[in-house]
Image: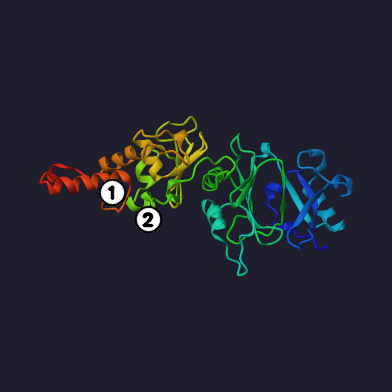
Amino acid sequence: MTVHCNFAGVPRVLKQIDNWVTFKNIVTKDGKKGRKIPFDCNTLCSTTACSNDQKTWSSFEIAEILAQEKHMSGIGFVLEKKLGIYCIDVDDCISTDGSLNKTARYALEPFKFGTYCELSYNKTGIHVFGMGTLPEDELGGARGDIEVYDDGRFIAVTGWRMLQCSDDITDNQWPLNVNLAQFPDKKKLTYIPQTTYKWLNSGSITDKLGLRCSSIALPDDYTHKNGCCFQGSHPFHGSSTGANFVIDDRENVWYCFRHNVGGGALELFAMKEGIIDCEDCGRNAFYGKWPEVMKALENAGYDLEKSGISNPLIKQRVNLKHTLTSLGVGRNVKN
């Protein structure tokens, strides 16, 4: 069995930590991805290792030797919270021509190739390693189309470094925060950004009015600007950390780490107007409040009728205007 690892390409930071195991890739009956079983180098790979038992881990040097002598599939590094090292795993993101899909490009963009990135064991995915930690209430795992871990998980390290990327792991807490915002935990997700809603099948209100999160409530104290993303204190309820609020200007969405909620520009506008609170954002955030939202948009100078936004409130006002105009008093009616 060929060992799937370029040992010389493994980051120096990881080599210095005795958190290594070997593994065998057991192919499933359907012939697709196999299951990676970790083995304990301290028993010459005769017993399995465990990602929460330090006694079953060893040094990089020992794992390298035994992986070759025992004909293992490769070596793996066990992540521990105290190490402050995380890994972003994006599966099945590389096409046959070697290009990355949208998910992988979005995940990599905040790093600007400034940390260690490698091809996965099957060469169809990528691993991104960085120095940083998940929030205390985050256990790690799948977040939409990516997986993020910093504890209790072994990662099959290949040493197949991606071109342009750093050859070692660097401090990258900010890019991790951006990815947590871009790919929220669906198990915790209680909202759907308003930009995804379609109003009467005629396009989103956000798009029709040209609402932008960054124009409505960009944090005054934001200390990071990475490409299209901004982070700082929540503009309406503040922050004890100075980094609990993120705007992704590319996707025109925002995320609040305190309440684990977020949304699009329309929710942010309504929050600014005091119509809804941050923690109330969700699928039914505007239930019973649409007239108030529409009135606030009009008062803010948005021309709803010209933008083609059709809703019962607007229709009533337009019909009333036309009726009064026909009676010669339409000039006194503001739409």
Question: In the rendered image, which residue does mark 1 sit on?
Answer: 304
Q: Position of residue 201 (x, y in %)?
A: 40, 55
Residue 312: name its quadrant: top left
The mark found on residue 202 in the picture is 2
Q: Is residue 278 left or right of residue 61?
A: left
Q: Is residue 1 left or right of residue 83?
A: right
Q: Position of residue 244 (x, y in %)?
A: 49, 36
Compare marks 1 and 2 and give the one earlier in the sequence. 2
Residue 244 in view here: yes
Specify how the rendered protein is coloured.
Answer: rainbow
Q: Amino acid at mark 1?
A: Leu
Quadrant (top left, top right, bottom left, bottom right) of the N terminus? bottom right
Q: Position of residue 206 (x, y in %)?
A: 37, 49
Nearest the viewer among 216 and 322 is: 322
Q: Amino acid at mark 2?
A: Ser
Residue at the image position 64 percent from the left and 59 percent from the top: 92
